[in-house]
Image (cartoon, coloured by chain):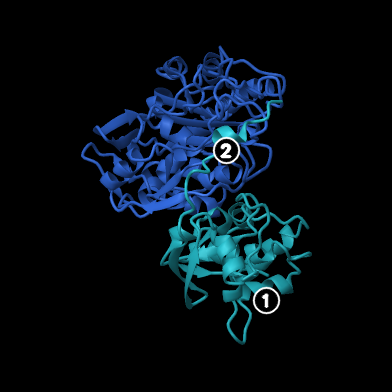
Chain colours: A cyan, B blue
Amino acid sequence: MVQRSTAQRSNDSIPLPDKIQIALSVNGVETTLRVAPWTTLLDALRDHLDLTGTKKGCDHGQCGACTVLVDGRRINSCLTLAVMKDGASVTTVEGLATRDALHPLQQAFIDHDAFQCGYCTPGQLCSAAGLIAEGKAKSPDEIRELMSGNICRCGAYPNIVAAIQQAMGGKS
Amino acid sequence: MINFQYSRASDVAEAVRMIAADPAAKFIAGGTNLVDLMKDDVERPSRLIDISRLPLKAVEATADGGLRIGALVPNSDLAYHPLIEQRYPLLSSAILAGASQQLRNMASTGGNLLQSTRCAYFYDTVTPCNKREPGSGCSAIGGINRIHAILGASEDCIATHPSDMCVALAALDAKVRVTGPAGERVIGFGDFHRLPGNTPQTDTNLHPNEIVTAVELPASGFAKNYSYLKIRDRLSYAFALVSIAAALELEGGVIKEARLALGGVAHKPWRDSAAEAALRGQRADQAGFARAAELLLRDAKGYEHNAFKIELARRGIVRTLTQAAHATPQSQSDKKIR
């Protein structure tokens, strides 16, 4: 195997860019923060805003643990650069419940025991909230297909589908 | 991920000026592929030029009865667009066969065309790869090549293009509208991507500093007789081992027009004019479909781990053409192949 020469590919001569100020509405709270261009939305939420509900799983868009809603649409925050979302509205798992009541999806996940270790759950919940807003999934097959971007290593999939069906108002 | 500069383009002309001013800069739109490659140190741009706010988000009618899709229309919006669902359901089906809904919400139409291969050696910066580092060698030819090409490969590269959407666009004879320092031009879909030859580092025939602004569909969408069948190691959220887009125009059981494009088998979406010509004027039956499959695969070559793809493609072509002829397209949620 040939070890790639790092010197050949280095661009150390480029000066560090200044941090860039961006405005985000996160769970209804207007926030400004200064981020480097390479800060992902996931890292901005967890490390800059201390919203650690959103999880870093694979960090490559393959597991869905980092799923949040941006302007109402579910995305992978690990593959999103925070600077590109200047002005956007972000909902994380911390923003799903109201002061007194769990979000219907959160209640349904409890009712159906739709998790074991819980690490994928914030992503599952945000993804399911996006799925319900999209209105494209009706049958269990369609829920499974449109939730396929969220991996659960504990294998709680049947209960996750049942919980989402309950929250959609279908049979529980 | 390396440190880089960030700029935001406010119109297409400015985007072209910005990229021409910095040879190591890259455009970013959805970021689903580029940010991933940057995290793995495969891509090391000096600057990202954010084109995500350019006004390229419309789906509109063209003078010749087709549709023009702005390069920044997200994959999910395109798949569910009423005009795409009604007039080009093959495209809708292919898009929904790829990635996850989160990624489709992020990924742009133009970016889907410009995806890099998912060859593991391209991603692994400690192994030789002619695509990543020209002249270093191809690790896949003698390595784990289960997902690699069986058609149009070279001694320098056996990588495949990973897109599903592009397979449908190839079958539909789409065109790609681009703008560069020399102005605007239109590229036929078959000429947009290229085979690896001895320059596998080049994926497309875009000129330097050109930007994709739109994809155009012709009037004919094959909305009645079509199917997109994707065969992969998982039921969802995996790249194709082999995928097939089939579209037919039938007249009393006889094939008037036929389109056949394959994904997961070559460096570009694979179409074969001889196979399509062999279908035209014939009855839509299994024997004819099998002859077309034989023709399309006549030069197929397997490697140690992917030779199964040749038989998989042969059977998949016959099955997908049958689904198209019967107007029973493959469902992308009910995974049973009928």
Local crowd at mark 2 within 10 Å, few (<14), some, or many (≥20)? Answer: some
Residue B102, relative to residue A28: is it above or below? above
Nearer to us in this view, A40 or B89: A40
- To which chain does the residue with label 1 belong? A
The numbered disc on residue B142 is none
- To which chain does the residue with label 2 belong? B
- Where disc 1 sits, the SS reads helix
Q: Tell me the residue at 39%/26% (across/down).
A: B205
In the image: residue B27, left or right of residue B140: left
Q: Quadrant of residue A115?
A: bottom right
Q: Amino acid at mark 2?
A: Val
- Circle 1 residue: A107
Residue B264, relative to residue B278: is it above or below? below
Q: Tell me the residue at 41%/23% (across/down).
A: B255
- Circle 2 residue: B42
Q: Is residue B90 visible?
A: no
Q: Tell me the residue at 73%/74% (across/down).
A: A111
Q: Position of residue A81 (x, y in %)?
A: 50, 56
Q: Position of residue A60 (x, y in %)?
A: 62, 49
Nearer to us in this view, B149 or B338: B149
Q: Amino acid at mark 1?
A: Gln
Question: Label 1 vs label 2: CA separation?
Answer: 43 Å
Q: Position of residue A152 (x, y in %)?
A: 72, 57
- Where disc 2 sits, the SS reads loop
Which quarter of the rendering shows the C terminus of chain B? top right
